[in-house]
Image (cartoon, grey):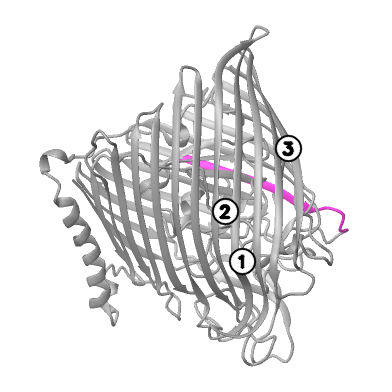
Amino acid sequence: MHPLYFFRYLQISDFKFRTSLFLAAVCFNGLLCSQEPAAETQTTLPEVVVEGKARPLLGVTDTASKGVATQEDFLSRPLLRRGEILETIPGMVITQHAGGGKANQYFLRGFNLDHGTDFAVSLDGMPLSFVSHAHGQGYTDLNPVIPELVDSIAYAKGTYTAADGDLSSAGSANFRLVDRLPGHMIKAEFGEYNYYRSLLAGTLPATEAGALTYGLEFNYYDGPWTQPEEFNRWNGLLRWFTGDEDDNLSVTFQGYTGSWTSTDQIPVRASGLGRFDTLDPTSGGDSERYSLNVAMQTRDGDVVTRANVYGIHYSLNLFSNFSYFVNGPLGDQFEQSENRWIFGGQVARTWEKREAFGVEHDFTLGAQTRHDFIDGIGLWNTTRRERTSIIRQDDLMQNSAGVYAELQSRWAPWFRTVLGLRGDLYHFDNQASTARNQEGSEWDGIVSPKFSAIFGPWHDTEYYLSFGTGFHSNDTRGVTASNSPADALVRTLGAEAGLRTQAIEDVTATLAFFWLRSDSELLYVGDAGTNEPGPGSDRYGVELATYWRPASWFSADAELALTYARLRGVGGDDRIPNSVPVMFSGGINLGAQGNAPGWFAGARVRAFGARPLDEANEFESRDSLMVNATLGYRRDNWEVALDCLNLLNRADNDIEYAYESQLKSELAPVNGVHAHPVEPRMFRARVTLRF
């Protein structure tokens, strides 16, 4: 148990340097903002009441599993790590098995999504998910996202949305940035295990040319690990926005850089090894991401056009060691590295309320394109981050173009349908490789129909039936291999029945039954740190979410997801490793809600059940239970709060795997469970000033 020492950071040897850096960032940025004339800045934060996921969506959405999470949903939660803002999506679990600069571990609808596979994430229409990534297909790192500058998260699950293409079989999420902030903000956070975070953000006074929103964030964290994590994260954002809700234009630049040291999962059989110890203190990495996104929307009567174009530069150097000493006394550390440019865009036009054959329709036609140019994506054997031999290195290009159409028809006041059709064309090109029989190119295409029927509302209850097909692409290196190439595009097929009700006053509830079939499962290989195509799979499940907001000072929610997942055509060894069968999340918020002044408090619990770690179910994980709490006080222009993470101080695990590894004392590899622990109880304080 860790004592209540919020000033434990005073014990660090280089306290003066880090604190000076922390305060310098805040003071320097505050100085810049203070140069604005006082009369032109907003000095108080207006009260904003936002319903978040409890908002009424009857007659708006076309499935029970679609929704929108707002700042009220994710900023009111105590967050251990950045990626947990996605836990506002019902049934989603976010954990970690390595340093904070690495993409999180995602679980949803019976998928161990690893670092994002089969769940597509974007930001204002710009992809955050990577194809043909050095560490695995669909790798999604949320470190470049600043939560305070996110207005909302629109999410969908399943294969029923025509605008969702590659990697979206389990679902999708699109972060929507704020267009303008009501003023300026300085936030300082500090906590145990040398946790520091500072943020300066705001919107400069608007002119006829538009408004400029800015953000600068610094974060440092060592964590409870024997080998300090030394996670450094810098984020910056500049966003110019002009226009109104109907006609607008935005230009957004974002930059992120991070470096860290990892404590990866360790074998539970290792006697004398502590929960927070490591077998390779030099694992870790560094990453950068810079992007420019130009987006626009216009409305001409009942015709709405939306479009955006983007460019992204990204790099990663990742050092991992999952099997320790299988290859000898120098260890099994390896490096995965890449450097890429991404260019793309999308455009969609919607013709609203058009009448044909006596029926009112909304018709949307859209097109999307994306081009990844990956220079020198490679895999090396390393020792203490020094390369000792090359395994392979490739120059890749992956191009895609998709078109889709969606027709929403209102046949009667109680019945409407959504018919969608999507077509995608892909080009995979391995232009140069150090591996034999790997160079080459491949074309593939796929057509994905979608359909939803919506009944009601009757007694403030709406019912949904949905069906659709989707797909995920495979890594270019596997697709272009001349020996046993992987399928370029793998089809998925899904169906869902559900309801959404507001029949009980102040309560919003959703219920969804789903089925999803994949022609080929992407399975995570722990000792290689990659995904490999496997057999097909089936998943069945039910999700229940309830949001209760009876008063301005109280809100509560509860979300439950039950999933049954199996591989197909493999006999008795049909378990899907790390497929979570039971997940629960719930919480309460008391006192001042949203931006209202006054005392506020909240608590959240997240639990997920034991799950198989191998196909034969010889190894099974432990259950996990996490309780977080917050307490604070808010005025119009300032706020203080205290978060307690892992309130019960449980010694659970964030992630567990079953695979072969070898310790120095062992003569041969041993198959067993490897675990990465949850972090112990800790306290973090934050102070926010608004002007």
- Where residue 219 sits in the image (x, y, percent)? 35, 64
Indicate the position of residue 390 as horizontal and vertical percent values: 66, 81
Looking at the picture, tell me which residue is in the foreground, 507 or 306.
Answer: 306
Pointer 1 local density, CA inside 10 Å: few below 14, some 14–19, many at least 20: many
The main secondary structure of the magenta stretch is strand
Residue type highlighted by circle 2: Ser
- For disc 1, the marked residue is 135
Q: Residue at x 75, y 63 (%)?
A: 478
Residue 377 lies in quadrant:
bottom right
Residue type of the residue flagged with mark 1: His
**Looking at this view, is 258 or 610 the one in front?**
258
Locate residue 395, reporting x and y percent.
64, 67
- Taking 167 as reference, is 288 above or below it? below
As drawn, 473 above or below 378:
above
**Residue 222 colored magenta?**
no
Nearer-N-terminus badge (1/3) = 1
Mark 1 and 2 residues: CB-CB less than 8 Å, in contact? no
Q: Which residues are magenta?
A: 557-571
Give the spatial CA distance, label 1 vs label 3: 28 Å
What mark, if any, has residue 448 been given in the picture? 3
Judged left or right of residue 51, residue 272 is right
Q: Earlier in the sequence, mark 1 or mark 2?
A: 2
- Res 459 visible: no
Residue type at mark 3? Ser
Would you name the residue on which mark 2 appears? 129
Answer with left or right where residue 167 lies relative to residue 546: right
Q: Is residue 561 magenta?
A: yes
